Image (cartoon, grey):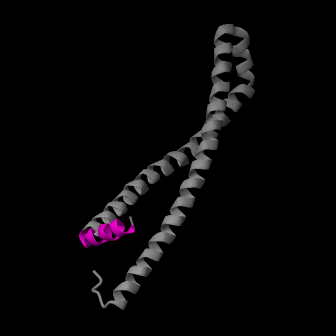
Amino acid sequence: MSKDNNEDLKNISPQNVIRLIDGFIEQMRQTRKTLALSLSLSISSIVVAPVAIGLSIFMLQHPSFFAILERENEFGLVLIVFLIGVIILSSVCLVVGIKQYRSINSWNKKYSVYSKKKEELDRNIATEYDLDQD
């Protein structure tokens, strides 16, 4: 079995390895773009959710709101359910947005460290083997 592995390793050309690495890097770029979109969505949920919660609480505590409740029974009930639903959904969006932001921020830091180490390693290899840097 190890003989087959050695033959497989001998049959791998440098071009195939370079294609694999290029494919991996392209996947990392695509993932980074997706994470950037996710980051913008998490930031918007962190901004929009507190505004929705604040407006809902303001409406629930406003004196005119109780006057509407007394005049319009069915509409008032629907409005209370709607506002409570907005508060609950906005709270969930806020929590998910914060968790997602932390996760993406952590990933970005790790990717930045990876990029710096990769560039340093590339420079070291280039200087060690007298390769031209483009």
Q: Residue at x 64, y 12 (%)?
A: 75
> Residue at the location (62% across, 32% down)?
89
Quadrant of residue 93 within the rendered picture:
top right
**Residue 11 located within the stretch drawn in magenta:** yes
Which residue is depicted at the point 68% across and 25% down? Answer: 84
* Residue 109 as seen in the image, left or right of residue 74: left
**Residue 122 drawn at (x, y percent):** 38, 80
The magenta stretch spans which residues?
2-15
Quadrant of the rendered image containing residue 54: top right
Q: How many marks?
A: 0
Q: Answer whether residue 117 is magenta in the image.
A: no
Percent from the top left, x then y, of residue 3?
Answer: 35, 69
- Please state if 10 lies on the left or on the right of 65 as rendered: left
Establish if 11 lies above or below 56: below
Majority SS type along the magenta span:
helix
Does residue 114 appear to the left or right of 84 in the view shown? left
The correct choice, above or below, for 117 with respect to 110 in the image is below
Residue 109 is left or right of residue 61, and the answer is left
* Position of the N terminus by quadrant: bottom left
